[in-house]
Image (spheres, rainbow, N blue to C red):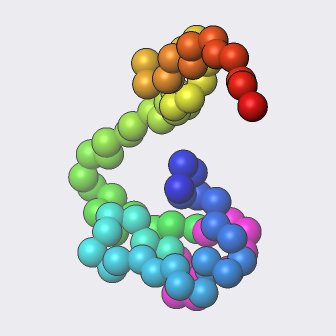
Amino acid sequence: MSNPARVTWKQQAVLSFEKTQRYVPVKAKLCPGVVMLRDTTPKEDEDIVESAAPKIGVPGISDDEPEPPEPFEFLR
């Protein structure tokens, strides 16, 4: 998923969290809406990562954009 924070109703039934992660849900059962997380190692430094918008397939911006096809004439 491009945005793992978005979950469909059907996906909620199979969601799980690893208990060894730094941040775990406060409630064991995940409900729709906001999920509150608890820091299991609050004394350790955090690694904050700023996300950037994906550049895949954006005309004029992405490097992986394919070239347009060569002009052709359709003959029946």
Q: Position of residue 67 (x, y in %)?
A: 51, 17
Q: Nearer the viewer, residue 35 or 71?
A: 71
Whether 30 is among the magenta residues is yes
| Outermost residue to the front | 76
Q: Residue at x 54, y 49 (%)?
A: 2
What main secondary structure does the magenta stretch of the protein show?
loop
**66, above or below 39, in the image:** above
Q: Residue at x 31, y 42 (%)?
A: 47
- Is residue 15 shown left or right of residue 47? right
Q: Residue at x 52, y 79 (%)?
A: 15
Q: Position of residue 3 (x, y in %)?
A: 57, 51
Q: Residue at x 31, y 68 (%)?
A: 21
**19, above or below 45, in the image:** below
**34, above or below 13, in the image:** above
Q: Which residues are magenta?
A: 26-35
Quadrant placement of the C terminus: top right
Q: Nearer the viewer, residue 37 or 30?
A: 30
Residue 62 in view, yes or no: no
